[in-house]
Structures are given as C-alpha cells and as structure tokens.
Amino acid sequence: MKIAYLLLATLLITTVAWADGLPLRDGRYPGAVLVFDLTEAQKSVIDRYRTCQLKNFKTMNVYTPYVFALTPSQSNVLKAKKGFSPKYFEIYETVRGFNDAGHHWNLVLRFSENQIEIPLDLVVTDKEARAQHDEQWWNPHNPCFAKLGSPVGWARLFVPTRL
C-alpha cells in the first residue's frame, strides 16, 4: 500500500511540474474562446513581435509583451461577451508551438496563420492587468513598438506604481 501511495504522489508531483504552460489541445485553448480573423495590420504586429521582441529576448525581456490590439469590431464583440475589452493583449503563436509558462492574462492565441482565439476566462480589465503588469516590472516603453509609449497609449495605462 505504501508503494501505491508513493507512486501516486510521484505522479501528482510530475503532473504539477508539467502544468506550467497553458492547457492547450493541438494548439487550441480547451475553454470558452472568441475566434477572430486577423487583419493584415494585426499580422504585421505579430510578425514584428516575433522578429523584434522574441528574436532579441535576452535584451528585450524587460519590456512589456502586451503589444497586440483588437480592431474596434473585435473589441465590441469581446465587450458584448465580457462586459469590457482590454486595450492590449500578449501574443502566443500556438501555430508555431509556443506554450510558454508564465503570466496568463489577456492572451491572444494565434492558432493558424489567419486566425486568433482569446480565452475568455483569462481576460481581465485594464485595471487588473495593470496590477499584474506592475508585478512583472516591465518597462512600458517597448522599443519594438514605440507608438505604445505615447502619452495616450500604453504608458498611460501601465506605469509601474511601486518604487
């Protein structure tokens, strides 16, 4: 009986260790999601994120990864479903096998070249996102996305409040 308990404990510990990433099935989120077609502009943002932010991860990991914005119509659909729509999202290209462990809020999962999905249970308000963003101490002035650092953009929403 002791061996059975030991095996069960080992199985539980290793299962918890594997559970760091998103619970994806074939690159798709298993819970409730909204699916949108990508615009060419959104594809460009994702490509820029991959070629600037991720390619230079060792020097760029101090900057916010929250750089993706929905179109006004996409935002309205999300607002109708959740009651609000955050200004910015982080991109995971699950189509390329990305499933990084870490923070999980306001995510856009690119599961195909032309479509994204947003896991509804991971969407939080801008106020909640700011608190979580502050925990990471990311610099909101991402040089890959200079426009986000404008006075009316990202920096206004996400200026670290702890000093």
Image (cartoon, rainbow, N blue to C red):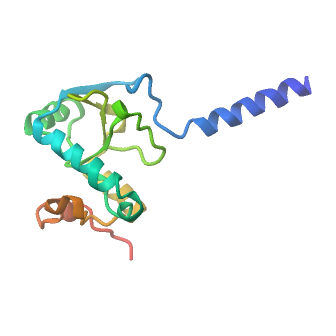
Q: Position of residue 161 (x, y in %)?
A: 33, 70
Badge count: 0
Q: Where is residue 75 in the image (x, y as percent from the top left)?
A: 15, 37
Report the residue that reaches farthest toward the left: 72
What residue appears at the point 27 percent right and 55 percent down from the top-left corner?
A: 52
Does 123 appear above or below 55? Answer: above
What residue appears at the point 21 percent right and 36 percent down from the top-left corner?
A: 83
What residue appears at the point 83 percent right and 27 percent down from the top-left corner?
A: 5
Does 99 appear above or below 30? Answer: below
Q: Residue 7's image quarter?
A: top right
Q: Where is residue 57 in the image (x, y as percent from the top left)?
A: 39, 57
Report the residue that reaches farthest toward the bottom: 163
Q: Residue 110's image quarter?
A: top left
Q: In which quarter of the image is the N terminus?
A: top right
Relative to 42, 127 lies left or right: right
Q: Quadrant of the C terminus?
A: bottom left
Q: Residue 71's image quarter?
A: top left
Q: Position of residue 136 (x, y in %)?
A: 41, 61
Front-most of 128 and 30? 30
What residue appears at the point 47 percent right and 30 percent down from the top-left corner?
A: 23
